[in-house]
Amino acid sequence: MIKVKNLHKSFDSLHVLKGIDLEIEQGKVVVVIGPSGSGKTTFLRCLNILETPTSGTVEIDAKALDFGEMVVVTHEMRFAREAADEVIFMDQGNIIERGKPEAIFTNPKEERTRRFLNMIQ
């Protein structure tokens, strides 16, 4: 399991990740979508220890031998819809919405998610 708690990342005065809280169950494939500049790649780089968060924590269950969890960032919505167990929509460094691919792509709850999906389709 991956647990992210109050994750922040800034580059000088640019606050990219703004308090991300997330748990990813063991064996799940999670796909992060969102517009360019929304913090997706920075979030992924923090999960992969390629960037050091400004604050907050990332915990990975060290006892687990099955490292089947996967987090993917993509601009390919068809891939996200087909590959993900869960989709996370990010914008301006925040998780705006998360859920099953079918729910996110056919009936998003948040207006910002709807606008993004309408813009790219």
Image (cartoon, rainbow, N blue to C red):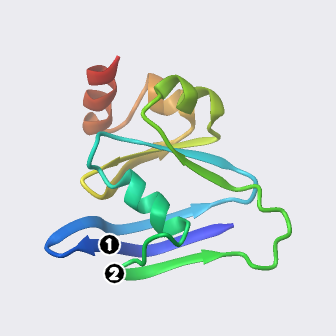
Location of residue 98 in the rendering, given as x and y in whole percent from the top left corner: 47, 46
Location of residue 83 in the rendering, given as x and y in whole percent from the top left corner: 64, 33
Location of residue 28 in the rendering, given as x and y in whole percent from the top left corner: 69, 50
Residue 99 or residue 49, whichever sits in front: 49
How far apart, in angstroms, are the residues tagged by discs 1 and 2?
5 Å
Q: Label 2's element?
A: loop
- In the rendered image of this protein, does residue 113 appear above or below residue 47? above
Amino acid type at mark 2: Thr
The residue that appears at 57% across and 64% down in the rendered structure is: 23
The residue that appears at 54% across and 32% down in the rendered structure is: 80
- In the rendered image of this protein, does residue 85 appear above or below residue 50? above
Residue indicated by mark 1: 9
Amino acid type at mark 1: Lys
Residue indicated by mark 2: 54
Q: Quadrant of the N terminus?
A: bottom right
102 on left or right of 115: right
Q: Quadrant of residue 14?
A: bottom left
The residue that appears at 75% across and 79% down in the rendered structure is: 62
